[in-house]
Image (tube, rainbow, N blue to C red):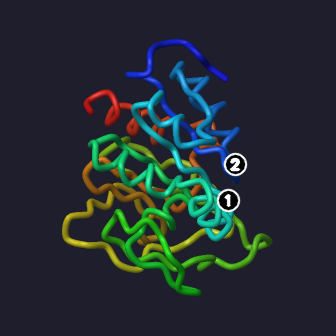
């Protein structure tokens, strides 16, 4: 775990459940200071947050027990950026289907869970993020959700096979794929740029 820098430039990685370790490795490659976020007081030490992939329903249970959901809402209210990947994108969405479940309701999107199929239907695809980079990037989908609706204030930054897979609303960024499982630093660097301007 990187511990360099002050809290004004430390990215937190929510470490309740899921693939948080791979996000840490990505940030290490970029040279970004980070720390794991396991308890609500940890939010005072960071200026941006990554919510990793994993099991969104399990994370919700942790949110209720630890008061983490409230802490995340307060974090966003302070104008600090959050990046949700896969399950993280589900948690950020305003509406969730297949089945319907609670969420943080922070982004004006509708997300369908496990829309690509089961774990065995996971895949690697090439997607386009023309506002971020001028070439296709590798995208890893694992039991991935699909963004079925995008609100008027949401920008689509990336698509794969014509479907939105990377969206942005204010200081919030959500990806239905796992950029931390590739060697491509584009998405994380874009998020960190948002954090540096916060």
Residue, x 68% and y 39% (percent of image)?
Answer: 22
Q: Quadrant of the N terminus?
A: top right
Q: Nearer the viewer, residue 121 or 68?
A: 68
What residue do we see at 37% from left, 41% from top?
A: 133
Q: In which quarter of the image is residue 86?
A: bottom right
Work out whether residue 165 or residue 75 is closer to the camera in this orientation and state it. Answer: 75
Q: Where is residue 29 in the image (x, y as percent from the top left)?
A: 60, 23
Write down the residue under mark 1: 54
> How many numbered marks have been drawn onto this rendered protein structure?
2
State left or right for residue 194 relative to residue 165.
left
**154 lies above or below 96:** above
Mark 1 and mark 2: span between their CA atoms? 6 Å
Q: Residue at 51% of width from left, 22% of height from top?
A: 32
Residue 82 percent across, percent down from the top left: 41, 46
In the picture of the structure, the residue carrying the numbered disc 2 is: 19
The C terminus, quarter of image: top left
Residue 78 drawn above or below residue 166: above
The mark nearer the N terminus, 1 or 2, is: 2
* x and y, in percent, of residue 20 in the image: 66, 43
153 horizontally vs 124: left or right: left
Q: Quadrant of residue 104?
A: bottom left
CB of mark 1 within 8 Å of CB of mark 2?
yes
């Amino acid at each position: 775990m990187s511990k360099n820098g002050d809290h004004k430039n430390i990215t937190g990685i929510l470490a309740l459940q899921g693939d948080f370790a791979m996000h840490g490795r990505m940030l290490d490659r970029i040279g970004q200071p980070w720390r794991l976020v396991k308890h609500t007081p940890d939010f005072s030490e960071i200026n941006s947050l990554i919510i990793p992939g994993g099991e969104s329903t399990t994370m919700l249970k942790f949110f209720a027990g630890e008061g983490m959901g409230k802490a995340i809402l307060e974090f966003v209210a302070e104008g600090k950026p959050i990046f949700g990947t896969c399950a993280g994108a589900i948690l950020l969405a305003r509406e969730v289907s297949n089945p319907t479940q609670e969420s943080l309701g922070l982004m004006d999107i509708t997300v369908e869970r496990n829309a690509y199929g089961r774990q065995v239907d996971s895949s690697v695809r090439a997607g386009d993020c023309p506002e971020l980079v001028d070439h296709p990037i590798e995208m890893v989908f694992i039991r991935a959700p699909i963004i079925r609706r995008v609100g008027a204030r949401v920008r689509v930054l990336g698509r794969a096979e014509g479907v939105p897979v990377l969206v942005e609303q204010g200081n919030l960024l959500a990806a239905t794929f796992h950029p931390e499982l590739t060697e491509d630093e584009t998405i994380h660097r874009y998020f960190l740029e948002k954090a540096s301007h916060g």
